Amino acid sequence: MADGYAGKYLRVDLTKEKFTILPTPEEWKRKYLGGVGMGAKIMWDEVPPEVKPLSPQNRIIFATGPVNGTLFPPSGRYEVISRSPLTGWWAHASAGGFFGPEMKYAGYDLIIIQGKAKKPVYLHIDNDLIELKSARHLWGKNVIETTDRIMEDLKDPDVKVAAIGQAGENLVRYSCIMSDYFRAAGRTGLGAVLGSKNLKAIAIRGTKGIKIANKEKFNKLLEDAFRRHSPEGRYWEYIESFRKYGTFSLTDWENAIGRLPTKNHWTGYFENAEETIGMEPMRKRHYKRHASCFGCGIQCKYSSVVKEGKYAGTESEGPEYETVEGFTSNFLSTDTSALIRANYLCNIYGMDTISVSHSISWAYESYEHGLLTKEDTDGRELIWGEDGMDDVIELLEEIPFRKTKFASLLAEGSREAARRTGKGSEAYAIHVNGLEASGQDGRPHKSLGLTYAINVRGADHLTSLSSLDELGYKEEIKRRYKKETVNILADRWDEKLKGYLVADMEELYALCDSALLCKYGVMWPPIYYHQDFGKIISAITGFTEYEDPKNLSKLAKRICHLRRCFNVRLGWSKKNDALHPRFTEEPMPTGPAKGQVVHLEPMLREYYQVRKYDWKTGYPTKKELEEVGLEDVAKELKKRKKLVPVYRGKKAFQIRK
Amino acid sequence: MKILNIDAEKCSGCRLCELACAFTKEKRIIPILGRVNVFQNYAWGLSVPVVCTQCEEAPCIKVCPTEALYRDPETNVVKVKEEKCIGCKLCVSACPYGAVVFIPEKKTVIKCDLCDGDPVCVKFCPTGALKYEEPVKATLSKRREQAEKIWEVL
């Protein structure tokens, strides 16, 4: 029996109103670790391609991992895994806060939800007590009202609540799951999956504990981890900045390299951003209070308030960097009060700030080019800049309720909105495989172009972004990679070797999302690397085999392959490993990266070499799948003619030392 | 003599102190076994660590029928002799703020003993909300911070 786990998992069948509690299988722990790894295993086994994302047969899995809820920082996250109603592909999203550790303290590694309740319900778990309670009085309420009311109903102010807002109820395709009021499992529209199942919330309370396999080793690793999060560590400067400003210190750093998406990703440079929407003005104008997720050594959380003007009194946790970009530079606006208001509305209605801001900016750019007119926009003139923000705020009040035809169109996400509108408006729907591009751009940061293109959940940064070339962590590159590769890897405009780098990051983040740490420990700043995961997994679970880099790499590859195979079974192929033409054909018009475009092919070739995908079809290879222990997966893909027997391409170059 | 000085305004609510305490004292990761617990109001973003403040006139010592609770004469810390504790829970009732907890599986009460002068919660606190310092110094540093705020306005 492995330590570090809660030991059991809960399956809730909402149709049958049935609960099943079973021991978490040892095979799941050892082969898939937890989080997205276990999620991938369950999705592959239980959700065949004919199951539509919003059908009762789809699963939605709340998953923790072995590191979750332990003292090892930052271990407060949980993952939610499903099939996305926004993209149609694999979906995962994670949130910080306190909900994940509480799941483990209540005794559950996973909560698997299936079926559909006849009437709105919420799930209440208090250690061994599990019950479905009516949510009729909660339906139609926002996230804050819902959370408050559940605490009142249960007479428990310490219960941890994950809930959907009205956006999830009304199946807005990018609605999210909000826990502890303000922490979002944001991307890929998982709120709509809960909405489709009539499940308004999960309220959980636990007082059990977690056993550590090797306490002595764990203690040593703890000391080292906390030293790395202290002024003695290499990245204190970044940690201090996140602690003081929150993640929006990234706004300044990104603009400096011409990678701050501006005007619907038209460019990557927003003039004077540092003085208008940067970290100093944001802190001065809106900073209210410092906060933290569970067990964190970085502590980037804080709350913001609008002190004057028409939105005075608006207060909410955040905004995060992505939201700052989405509701300021994305609309050419410097109105930070409107930004705080927008962030607040997205939080209470439960919408992904990235997808909603970029779906609205699709409409703004389409309007600019005459593809949408006042007739389509309920009489609105959609104009860029501060003066256009009133309409953005209004739309954020309408989209969650699908109040008008236009709001309902935007609620479908930019890809579908553009498809229905036609007339070439697809050119302004900046998404990859259905997911709106987040606050990055591949033109000034080439490896990011590949990150978007090969990402199993579409255009987002959290599955394989390399911060090493992005922010010039050259010393870290020297520590990790071969001497002759250092200068090329550190050059963010050079496509060479970036395919190998992105594959390495994808594997690292697969471990991070399965052991379950926050991405801020491996990305901004890059505190942990593969061997750190090997050691901590071994100390907590007793799986000592993962201290061997070969086994660890196999585990990471297994998770990456399985997620991709889930997509391949759904119809994913080479043509999906592509980018929006804005990044490949429109040279960056302004800023420090002026003139740059992404040349995807060389990076994609390298990436395919590592994964041993067939260059023509993008399908995986039998031998590779078998090597990482996915024999059954290979068999099924073979039946479906989506497997290549032998890899005939070049051998991948090893960049790692 | 030093005291555990709590500056609630600095507490970010990360709960590292709870876990560090539980792991050090009980070798397990169970937040409720922490002698310190952080209470949060997520909606307001407020957090406060609650822990024994080592009362000078300690009600827990007064009500203990077996002298399991006693004051260490050297450090002034109120401690539990577990082997003497009969699990009557009178101290739990007497403590005005819940700092003494009865643990059913141990059949004894637990409370903060300041780790014999080197409190682990302080070591793990990333924000300085928990400090171990001389009481007068603690008060003065708080006053200084107040003064700094006034300077900002001036």
Image (spheres, rainbow, N blue to C red):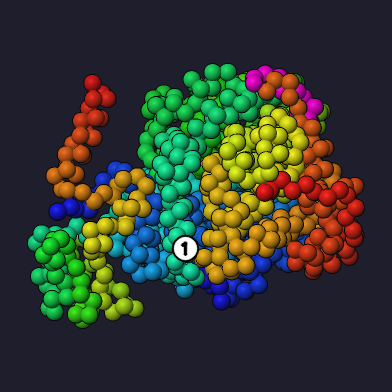
As for residue A580 lying within the magenta part, the answer is: yes
Judge from the rendering whether residue A336 lies leftward or rightward of residue A458; answer left or right: left
Against B11, residue B94 (above or below) is: below
Quarter of the figure with residue A625: bottom right
Q: Nearer the viewer, residue A266 or A619?
A: A619
Given the image, on which type of amino acid does mark 1 rest? Phe
Quarter in which the N terminus of chain A is drawn: bottom right
Q: Residue at x 12, y 72 (%)?
A: B63
Give residue A74's position: percent from left, percent from top: 48, 52
Residue underneath mark 1: A218
Q: In this view, which residue lies farthest toward the front?
A: A483
Q: Nearer the viewer, residue A353 or A478?
A: A478
Judge from the rendering whether residue A583 lies leftward or rightward of residue A389; answer left or right: right
Give residue B13's position: percent from left, percent from top: 37, 50
User: Residue A196, can we see it?
Assistant: no
Give residue A289's position: percent from left, percent from top: 37, 38
Against A312, residue B79 (above or below) is: below
Judge from the rendering whether residue A23 lies leftward or rightward of residue A615; answer left or right: left
Q: Residue at x 10, y 70 (%)?
A: B62
The chain under label 1 reads: A
Residue numbers of the magenta segment: A578-592
Against B111, residue A139 (above or below) is: above
Judge from the rendering whether residue B101 lies leftward or rightward of residue B29; answer left or right: left
Give residue B81's position: percent from left, percent from top: 20, 75
As for residue A68 lying within the magenta part, the answer is: no
Q: Residue at x 18, y 52 (%)?
A: B2
Quarter of the figure with residue A15: bottom right
Most common secondary structure along the magenta stretch: loop
Against A515, residue A399 (above or below) is: above
